Image (spheres, rainbow, N blue to C red):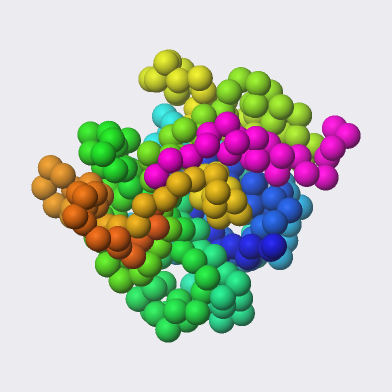
Amino acid sequence: MKHYVLLFCDPGIDDAMAMMLAIMHPQIELVGIVTSYGNVTKEQSIINADYILKVAGITDVPVIPAAFRSFSEFDEEAYPEIHGSAGLGSIIPPNHFPGNRVGFDTIRSILLTYKQNLTIIELGRMTALAKAFNLFENEFRYIKNVIVMGGAFFMPGNRTPIAEANIYGDSVSAKFIFNYLNTIITPLNITSQAMFTPALMQRLASHPKFGKTIQALLSVYTAYYKENQPHLPGPPIHDIVPLLVMVQPSLSTYVYRDVDVITNGKAKGMTMIDLRTMSEEGRHKIAWTVNADRLLHEYERAMFTGYADE
Protein backbone atom coordinates (compact mmCIF):
# COMPACT_ATOMS: atom_id res chain seq x y z
CA MET A 1 0.00 0.00 0.00
CA LYS A 2 1.36 3.39 -1.01
CA HIS A 3 1.11 6.33 1.41
CA TYR A 4 1.14 9.78 -0.18
CA VAL A 5 2.60 12.26 2.32
CA LEU A 6 2.59 16.05 2.56
CA LEU A 7 5.22 16.84 5.18
CA PHE A 8 5.05 19.96 7.39
CA CYS A 9 8.43 20.45 9.05
CA ASP A 10 11.20 22.73 10.32
CA PRO A 11 14.46 20.96 9.36
CA GLY A 12 16.31 20.61 11.86
CA ILE A 13 18.16 17.33 12.28
CA ASP A 14 15.33 14.99 13.16
CA ASP A 15 13.11 16.57 10.48
CA ALA A 16 15.89 15.98 7.94
CA MET A 17 16.14 12.36 9.10
CA ALA A 18 12.38 12.05 8.59
CA MET A 19 12.67 13.53 5.10
CA MET A 20 15.29 10.94 4.19
CA LEU A 21 13.09 8.16 5.55
CA ALA A 22 10.14 9.43 3.51
CA ILE A 23 12.35 9.43 0.41
CA MET A 24 13.72 5.94 1.02
CA HIS A 25 10.65 4.13 2.36
CA PRO A 26 9.23 1.86 -0.37
CA GLN A 27 5.65 2.48 0.82
CA ILE A 28 5.86 6.27 1.04
CA GLU A 29 5.66 8.83 -1.74
CA LEU A 30 6.62 12.32 -0.64
CA VAL A 31 4.40 14.76 -2.56
CA GLY A 32 5.38 18.04 -0.90
CA ILE A 33 7.33 19.69 1.93
CA VAL A 34 5.95 22.68 3.83
CA THR A 35 8.79 24.51 5.60
CA SER A 36 8.49 26.86 8.58
CA TYR A 37 10.36 28.32 11.55
CA GLY A 38 11.08 26.15 14.59
CA ASN A 39 14.36 24.30 14.94
CA VAL A 40 15.70 26.93 12.53
CA THR A 41 14.39 30.10 10.90
CA LYS A 42 11.90 29.90 8.05
CA GLU A 43 14.61 30.95 5.58
CA GLN A 44 17.01 28.27 6.80
CA SER A 45 14.30 25.61 6.77
CA ILE A 46 13.76 26.26 3.05
CA ILE A 47 17.47 25.99 2.31
CA ASN A 48 17.77 22.80 4.37
CA ALA A 49 14.82 21.11 2.66
CA ASP A 50 16.25 22.03 -0.74
CA TYR A 51 19.62 20.61 0.32
CA ILE A 52 18.26 17.22 1.43
CA LEU A 53 16.31 16.91 -1.83
CA LYS A 54 19.48 17.82 -3.75
CA VAL A 55 21.46 15.10 -1.96
CA ALA A 56 18.66 12.67 -2.82
CA GLY A 57 18.74 13.71 -6.47
CA ILE A 58 15.09 14.80 -6.39
CA THR A 59 13.87 17.83 -8.33
CA ASP A 60 10.10 17.32 -8.62
CA VAL A 61 8.97 17.48 -4.97
CA PRO A 62 7.59 20.98 -4.27
CA VAL A 63 9.00 22.94 -1.32
CA ILE A 64 6.36 25.29 0.08
CA PRO A 65 7.67 28.14 2.28
CA ALA A 66 5.18 28.87 5.05
CA ALA A 67 5.23 30.36 8.56
CA PHE A 68 8.01 32.60 9.87
CA ARG A 69 6.61 33.25 13.39
CA SER A 70 4.38 31.72 16.03
CA PHE A 71 0.95 33.16 16.82
CA SER A 72 1.58 32.74 20.54
CA GLU A 73 5.30 32.58 21.38
CA PHE A 74 6.86 35.68 19.86
CA ASP A 75 10.32 35.24 21.37
CA GLU A 76 10.84 31.62 20.34
CA GLU A 77 14.37 31.05 19.00
CA ALA A 78 16.22 28.40 17.00
CA TYR A 79 18.40 25.80 18.73
CA PRO A 80 21.93 25.80 17.24
CA GLU A 81 23.35 24.00 20.29
CA ILE A 82 21.16 21.01 19.40
CA HIS A 83 20.89 21.18 15.62
CA GLY A 84 24.08 22.98 14.58
CA SER A 85 24.55 26.53 13.35
CA ALA A 86 22.49 25.95 10.19
CA GLY A 87 20.24 23.22 11.55
CA LEU A 88 21.93 20.28 9.79
CA GLY A 89 24.64 19.32 12.27
CA SER A 90 28.07 20.15 10.88
CA ILE A 91 26.68 20.86 7.39
CA ILE A 92 26.41 24.46 6.18
CA PRO A 93 24.23 24.02 3.10
CA PRO A 94 24.93 26.49 0.29
CA ASN A 95 22.00 28.67 -0.68
CA HIS A 96 22.20 28.02 -4.40
CA PHE A 97 19.94 25.01 -4.82
CA PRO A 98 16.68 26.70 -5.77
CA GLY A 99 14.87 23.38 -5.80
CA ASN A 100 11.21 23.44 -6.68
CA ARG A 101 9.93 26.28 -4.50
CA VAL A 102 6.26 27.09 -4.97
CA GLY A 103 3.55 29.20 -3.37
CA PHE A 104 1.38 28.39 -0.35
CA ASP A 105 -1.69 27.74 -2.51
CA THR A 106 0.08 24.62 -3.81
CA ILE A 107 -1.14 22.97 -0.59
CA ARG A 108 -4.69 23.31 -1.88
CA SER A 109 -3.70 21.73 -5.21
CA ILE A 110 -2.08 18.79 -3.39
CA LEU A 111 -5.18 18.30 -1.21
CA LEU A 112 -7.39 18.23 -4.30
CA THR A 113 -5.07 15.96 -6.26
CA TYR A 114 -4.64 13.19 -3.68
CA LYS A 115 -7.79 13.57 -1.55
CA GLN A 116 -8.48 10.37 0.43
CA ASN A 117 -5.05 8.99 -0.47
CA LEU A 118 -3.20 11.85 1.25
CA THR A 119 -1.74 11.89 4.76
CA ILE A 120 -0.47 15.15 6.22
CA ILE A 121 2.33 14.71 8.74
CA GLU A 122 3.17 17.65 11.00
CA LEU A 123 6.63 17.49 12.60
CA GLY A 124 6.92 21.04 13.93
CA ARG A 125 4.95 23.97 15.25
CA MET A 126 1.41 23.93 13.89
CA THR A 127 1.33 27.53 12.66
CA ALA A 128 1.35 26.68 8.95
CA LEU A 129 -0.98 23.71 9.40
CA ALA A 130 -3.50 25.92 11.21
CA LYS A 131 -3.28 28.51 8.44
CA ALA A 132 -3.74 25.87 5.75
CA PHE A 133 -6.73 24.31 7.52
CA ASN A 134 -8.30 27.74 8.06
CA LEU A 135 -7.94 28.56 4.34
CA PHE A 136 -8.68 25.15 2.84
CA GLU A 137 -11.18 23.69 5.30
CA ASN A 138 -13.35 22.04 2.63
CA GLU A 139 -10.37 20.40 0.93
CA PHE A 140 -9.13 19.02 4.27
CA ARG A 141 -12.41 17.15 4.70
CA TYR A 142 -11.48 14.71 1.94
CA ILE A 143 -7.96 13.67 2.98
CA LYS A 144 -7.08 10.43 4.72
CA ASN A 145 -5.28 11.45 7.93
CA VAL A 146 -3.42 14.20 9.76
CA ILE A 147 -0.63 12.88 11.99
CA VAL A 148 1.01 15.20 14.52
CA MET A 149 4.33 14.75 16.30
CA GLY A 150 3.73 16.65 19.49
CA GLY A 151 2.47 16.75 23.02
CA ALA A 152 3.42 14.96 26.22
CA PHE A 153 0.92 13.13 28.40
CA PHE A 154 1.65 12.46 32.07
CA MET A 155 5.39 12.86 31.55
CA PRO A 156 7.92 15.73 31.58
CA GLY A 157 8.09 17.98 28.55
CA ASN A 158 11.22 18.81 26.58
CA ARG A 159 10.57 22.57 26.33
CA THR A 160 9.24 23.21 29.84
CA PRO A 161 8.70 20.79 32.73
CA ILE A 162 5.24 20.00 31.33
CA ALA A 163 5.24 21.08 27.68
CA GLU A 164 6.62 19.48 24.52
CA ALA A 165 8.46 21.88 22.21
CA ASN A 166 6.17 21.77 19.15
CA ILE A 167 3.03 22.43 21.16
CA TYR A 168 4.67 25.08 23.33
CA GLY A 169 6.09 26.83 20.25
CA ASP A 170 2.59 27.72 19.04
CA SER A 171 0.05 26.62 21.61
CA VAL A 172 -2.70 28.73 20.01
CA SER A 173 -2.37 26.97 16.65
CA ALA A 174 -2.13 23.59 18.38
CA LYS A 175 -5.34 24.28 20.31
CA PHE A 176 -7.06 25.35 17.08
CA ILE A 177 -6.03 22.17 15.28
CA PHE A 178 -7.06 19.86 18.12
CA ASN A 179 -10.38 21.67 18.55
CA TYR A 180 -11.43 21.49 14.90
CA LEU A 181 -9.52 18.69 13.17
CA ASN A 182 -9.38 14.99 13.98
CA THR A 183 -5.78 13.85 14.25
CA ILE A 184 -3.49 10.96 15.05
CA ILE A 185 -0.94 12.06 17.65
CA THR A 186 2.50 10.59 18.29
CA PRO A 187 3.52 12.32 21.54
CA LEU A 188 6.82 12.57 23.33
CA ASN A 189 5.79 9.47 25.32
CA ILE A 190 6.63 7.26 22.38
CA THR A 191 8.88 9.38 20.14
CA SER A 192 11.46 9.70 22.93
CA GLN A 193 11.90 5.92 22.71
CA ALA A 194 13.28 6.07 19.15
CA MET A 195 16.89 6.27 20.37
CA PHE A 196 19.69 5.65 17.90
CA THR A 197 22.27 3.26 19.29
CA PRO A 198 25.94 3.48 18.22
CA ALA A 199 25.45 0.29 16.17
CA LEU A 200 22.52 1.79 14.27
CA MET A 201 24.40 5.04 13.64
CA GLN A 202 27.37 3.10 12.33
CA ARG A 203 25.08 1.19 10.00
CA LEU A 204 23.47 4.43 8.76
CA ALA A 205 26.91 5.92 8.08
CA SER A 206 27.31 3.25 5.38
CA HIS A 207 24.13 4.26 3.56
CA PRO A 208 24.94 4.57 -0.17
CA LYS A 209 22.87 7.71 -0.72
CA PHE A 210 22.72 9.48 2.64
CA GLY A 211 25.58 8.03 4.71
CA LYS A 212 27.86 11.08 4.76
CA THR A 213 24.92 13.39 5.30
CA ILE A 214 23.63 11.34 8.24
CA GLN A 215 27.10 11.28 9.81
CA ALA A 216 27.29 15.06 9.60
CA LEU A 217 23.76 15.48 10.92
CA LEU A 218 24.20 13.22 13.92
CA SER A 219 27.64 14.46 14.97
CA VAL A 220 26.33 17.62 16.67
CA TYR A 221 23.11 15.97 17.83
CA THR A 222 24.92 13.05 19.45
CA ALA A 223 27.41 15.32 21.17
CA TYR A 224 24.58 17.39 22.63
CA TYR A 225 22.82 14.36 24.09
CA LYS A 226 26.06 12.85 25.41
CA GLU A 227 26.70 16.05 27.34
CA ASN A 228 23.17 16.77 28.51
CA GLN A 229 21.59 13.32 28.84
CA PRO A 230 24.50 10.88 29.13
CA HIS A 231 22.27 8.15 30.58
CA LEU A 232 20.59 7.63 27.19
CA PRO A 233 21.93 4.92 24.84
CA GLY A 234 21.83 7.43 22.00
CA PRO A 235 19.97 10.49 20.69
CA PRO A 236 16.20 10.24 20.13
CA ILE A 237 15.09 10.92 16.55
CA HIS A 238 11.51 11.89 17.31
CA ASP A 239 10.35 12.74 13.81
CA ILE A 240 10.80 9.33 12.21
CA VAL A 241 8.09 7.90 14.46
CA PRO A 242 4.96 9.35 12.78
CA LEU A 243 6.08 8.02 9.39
CA LEU A 244 6.73 4.53 10.70
CA VAL A 245 3.49 4.38 12.69
CA MET A 246 1.58 5.58 9.63
CA VAL A 247 2.87 2.65 7.58
CA GLN A 248 2.58 0.12 10.41
CA PRO A 249 -0.02 1.19 12.99
CA SER A 250 0.56 -2.06 14.91
CA LEU A 251 3.87 -0.63 16.16
CA SER A 252 1.82 1.25 18.76
CA THR A 253 -1.15 0.89 21.04
CA TYR A 254 -3.66 3.75 21.14
CA VAL A 255 -6.12 5.62 23.31
CA TYR A 256 -8.90 7.80 21.92
CA ARG A 257 -9.49 11.06 23.76
CA ASP A 258 -10.24 14.73 23.18
CA VAL A 259 -7.10 16.85 23.63
CA ASP A 260 -6.97 20.29 25.17
CA VAL A 261 -3.97 22.66 25.11
CA ILE A 262 -3.18 25.27 27.76
CA THR A 263 -2.31 28.54 26.02
CA ASN A 264 -1.21 30.81 28.88
CA GLY A 265 0.38 30.88 32.30
CA LYS A 266 2.97 28.54 33.73
CA ALA A 267 1.26 25.53 32.15
CA LYS A 268 1.39 26.98 28.62
CA GLY A 269 1.88 24.25 26.02
CA MET A 270 0.63 21.45 28.25
CA THR A 271 -1.52 18.85 26.48
CA MET A 272 -4.40 17.49 28.54
CA ILE A 273 -6.66 14.45 28.22
CA ASP A 274 -9.15 12.81 30.59
CA LEU A 275 -8.17 9.23 31.42
CA ARG A 276 -10.51 8.76 34.35
CA THR A 277 -12.42 5.49 34.25
CA MET A 278 -15.72 7.28 33.62
CA SER A 279 -14.35 9.40 30.76
CA GLU A 280 -15.58 8.77 27.24
CA GLU A 281 -13.51 8.09 24.15
CA GLY A 282 -12.68 11.16 22.09
CA ARG A 283 -11.87 12.13 18.54
CA HIS A 284 -8.06 12.03 18.61
CA LYS A 285 -6.14 8.77 18.21
CA ILE A 286 -3.14 9.01 20.53
CA ALA A 287 -0.25 6.56 20.20
CA TRP A 288 0.23 5.40 23.78
CA THR A 289 2.93 2.71 23.78
CA VAL A 290 5.39 1.64 21.12
CA ASN A 291 7.49 -1.41 20.38
CA ALA A 292 10.77 0.51 20.20
CA ASP A 293 12.94 -2.42 19.06
CA ARG A 294 10.58 -3.29 16.25
CA LEU A 295 10.20 0.37 15.28
CA LEU A 296 13.96 0.82 14.86
CA HIS A 297 14.20 -2.48 13.00
CA GLU A 298 11.54 -1.28 10.56
CA TYR A 299 13.33 2.05 10.23
CA GLU A 300 16.63 0.39 9.32
CA ARG A 301 14.91 -2.00 6.92
CA ALA A 302 13.13 0.85 5.14
CA MET A 303 16.30 2.95 4.84
CA PHE A 304 18.22 0.12 3.21
CA THR A 305 15.51 -1.30 0.94
CA GLY A 306 17.13 -1.60 -2.46
CA TYR A 307 20.63 -1.76 -0.97
CA ALA A 308 20.59 -5.36 0.22
CA ASP A 309 24.11 -6.03 -1.04
CA GLU A 310 25.68 -3.01 0.63
User: Which region is colored magenta?
Assistant: 288-310
Check the picture and name the quadrant holding the C terminus: top right
- Return the residue found at the far front: 278
100 lies above or below 270: below
Q: Is residue 147 above or below residue 152?
A: below
The structure residue drawn at horizontal position 61% and vertical position 76%, both measured from the top left corner, is 114
Task: Tell me, yes or no, whether the highlighted magenta stretch contains residue 302.
Answer: yes
| Residue 217 screen position, x and y as percent | 59, 33
Residue 280 visible to the viewer: yes
Left or right, 63 with respect to 229, comes to right
Query: Which image quadrant is residue 31 in?
Result: bottom right
With 277 as the anchor, is 151 left or right in this view? Answer: right
* Furthest residue toward left: 265
Q: Position of residue 134 (x, y in %)?
A: 35, 76
Residue 239 x/y as whole percent? 50, 44
Q: Does any portion of residue 37 appear in the rendered image?
A: no
Indicate left or right for 309 with 119 as reference.
right
Position of residue 34 measured from the top left corner of the image (x, y, whole percent) = 51, 62
> Where the N terminus falls, by quadrant?
bottom right
Q: Quadrant of residue 115?
A: bottom right
Camera-side residue of 109 and 287? 287
In the image, what residue occupies the spot 65% across and 26% down?
Answer: 200
Along the line of sight, the residue nearer the viewer: 112 or 143: 143
Taking the magenta stretch, the answer to whether it contains residue 135 is no
| Number of marks present in the image shown | 0
Give the camera-side residue of 38 and 2: 2
User: Residue 265 or 144: which is nearer the viewer?
Assistant: 144
Q: Residue at x 73, y 53 (%)?
A: 26
Which residue is pictured at 78% across the width and 44% down the height?
305
